[in-house]
Amino acid sequence: MAFAFFRRRQKLVIIIMAVLMVTFLIGFQGFEQLVRRRPETEPIGTGRWDDVLRRDLVQAHGDIELLRIIGLGRSHYQMMGIPTETEFLALMNNDWNEVPLTYALLLKEAEDSGTVSVTDQDVDQFLRDIGLTGAQYERLVAQIGDRRQDGGEMLRGAVARWLTVSTSFNSATTSVLPSEPQLRHAYRNLTEQINLRVGEFRADDLLEELTDEPTDDDILAHYNRYRSSEAGQAQSPEEFGFGYRRPNRIAVSYLFVDRDVVERVAKPSRTRVFSYWREHRDEFVREVPVDNDNEDEPTEYRQEPMTFSEAEPLIIEQLKPETVESQMEALLRRAEFLLDEVSPDSETDPYVRVRRRMARPADATLQREVTVRISRQPLNRAIEILADAADLDAIYYPWGQRGDIYIDPEVEITLPAERTTDAPLEDVLHEITRHALDEMDEEDADIEINWAHSVELENVLFPVDREMDAFPVSAERTELLSLSRLINHEILGNAYTSREAGDGLWRRAFDAEAFRPERGTIREGDTGPRMFVRDDRTGRLLWRLSETQTAHDPPEAETIDDIPADLVEAARRDLKLLSAMDIARGRAEEVFAEAGEDNLAEALEEAGARVFETGLFSRQTYGLEWRGIPQMRAGDQNVLRYMVERAFELAPEKVNDQVEGDSPQKKVLELPPRRSVSVLERIDYRPASRDGYEQERDQVAMLLAQQRIFTAALEWFDSDNVVRRGEFRRARED
């Protein structure tokens, strides 16, 4: 099935390959920074399988990226149809920075065994199996080739070396077929389904109900107990996951160019629009009905060329994507130019100072006198009319949710003529804002909007207040962030080296020398590559690694004054969460005991629970991972398994696919890792069927066998195990 998908969607596959090529080049160039200025024959270590040279790492990295380009490295579920995908996923399960060395050692191990032989026919068969033949193959090898080496030789060499490694693994491992009871148990976990109504009481939501504060002695004892543990690392359903150990942390300085803002105001110049019309005027036609005296015949149409004024709005829309890209690039280049000018020694972060310099005062523009008529126009159209009257390309008015106020862009605006005739632009903007708030019954709101221009967008007005800010460029120096907090950062957590793929900023930033001495690829103070920001907010990013702090245990404390202030507050809040869990438990047990089946949902809502339905769900995914309860994910697979097993205790008893008896329909579930206590109620159930098992038995057997192979592969390809098998020692350790 996976191969058929590959063949049917050849154009899509080629596009994906092109995107991955960009990722490949970026990743490979970054890796080469580690090895440049050093001879390729320099040994980086030795072991039982001969020396590993620096050129071996370069080759390993190149091979891995080529294998990713041709499709290896998909998810665990997708891997079933791709030859050797299991082994490749196991290799990539290592720390990315260890993968090239691990692969180089695996290749030496396979070659040293003397039992593995890969032929040209094996390579041809592999390429056929993944659907990479004919025109697709020719296009790809043309893309990856260079002056030093033919693309076909590069690709076939990488595949041959990979087949040598994967064959060596398969020769060294044996698999045992799953038993019939194991198959039936797995089928049940995959197909038996239950639907729950959940009423969840979260401790976080109950903190305000607490009247007592933890004592200093309580905080001191709690802190010392968990100071060497990492927060959020609950390994069992009984653990809260408290911890105050400082993980590796970084501070990042960044400048973000907001694509959404630029897109709203981007407008090609009239010269560009007219030039495009002259070059493509044949494309812009309108249909005109042909006069026909016979009313019984259908109307015929002839095409006439559009005038420039008719074609202009169509051209503007057509040119918008290129205009947005051009203006984004101009803002980035200007920011980079200004960064080169600012002094790094100032107390103010360079990116913050550049952001300030990119704003231009708008006082003269705001005092410009305008005459405009606005009657019964929606707010967004009224702003367009005002921008035209003020001879501006655009005014970015901050409608939408702004702090506690939502400004509706469709609210109707009508202004008295005497207030919009020969009036300063600033006054008219103020009148529009006041009228909009009146229409939305927000007349008591006090809004004063400050405005500015931007470099490269000189003829556009942008609001620059805190809650109303919509300037196209923002900048910040973050506080020290752990990896998890960086990944969850609204902008930095969604920044990647390419538009569709590429390394995340979090990966690049945490590959710091401070955390990986002599192997890290970035140092404190280094500037990182430009990034693309994706998902909820989109744009481009400039950044640098401003500060690093290695993981460490905070000091043991004898008094509360010995505890860092932020950890005092963290311990205080955690102790309050324990008290709030007591409240949550009491509420859940009270509702469970007193409410009947007919009014359970109503009773939960009245008690303040978050009430929702899960929908039908099974115990495990087809990747054989535990699901947990939908909308209640927390912790690792051990915690998710506990959750789902408690949920299925509500399943009715079955005999021969028929529901014969009944189990309790509701129960209380306490989850310390999630800081919640819930009442679960079964509202629907679908058993696993005997007929379904007979039909899907072979597929389940394949899943289990694949899972066992994958588990074995994780052990075989684990970097520590490979180093241990090869008795490898780094050169600097000798």
Image (cartoon, rainbow, N blue to C red):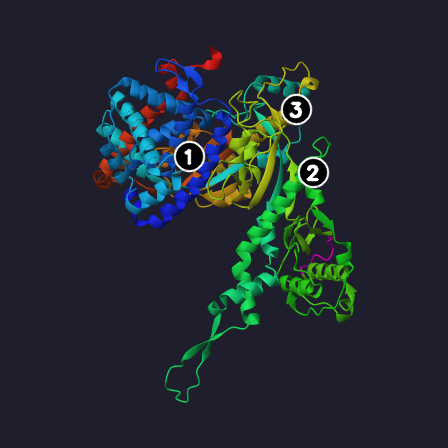
Is-magenta flag for residue 169?
Answer: no
Query: Residue 475: which quarter of the image?
Result: top right
Return the mark for residue 628.
Answer: 1
The residue located at (51%, 28%) in the rendering is 33
The residue labelled by disc 3 is 568
Residue 590's spot in the image, x, y percent?
51, 35
Q: Amino acid at mark 3?
A: Val
Is-magenta flag for residue 443?
Answer: yes
Magenta span covers which residues? 440-449
The residue labelled by disc 2 is 341
Are the two marked residues, 1 and 2, in contact with CB atoms closer than 8 angstroms? no
Residue 362's spot in the image, x, y percent?
75, 54
Residue 727's spot in the image, x, y percent?
38, 13
Q: Secondary structure at mark 2?
A: helix
**On screen, residue 334 above or below 345:** below
Q: Secondary structure at mark 1?
A: loop
Can you name the residue that lies furthest to the front here?
Answer: 147
Are the two marked residues, 3 and 1, in contact with CB atoms closer than 8 angstroms? no
Disc 1 packing (10 Å; few <14; some 14–19; many ≥20): many
Q: Secondary structure at mark 3?
A: helix
**On screen, residue 264 above or below 249:** below
Q: CA distance from mark 3 to mark 1?
A: 33 Å
Are the two marked residues, 3 and 2, in contact with CB atoms closer than 8 angstroms? no
Instruction: Work out whether residue 656 can be spotted.
Output: no
| Circle nearer the N terminus (1, 2) | 2
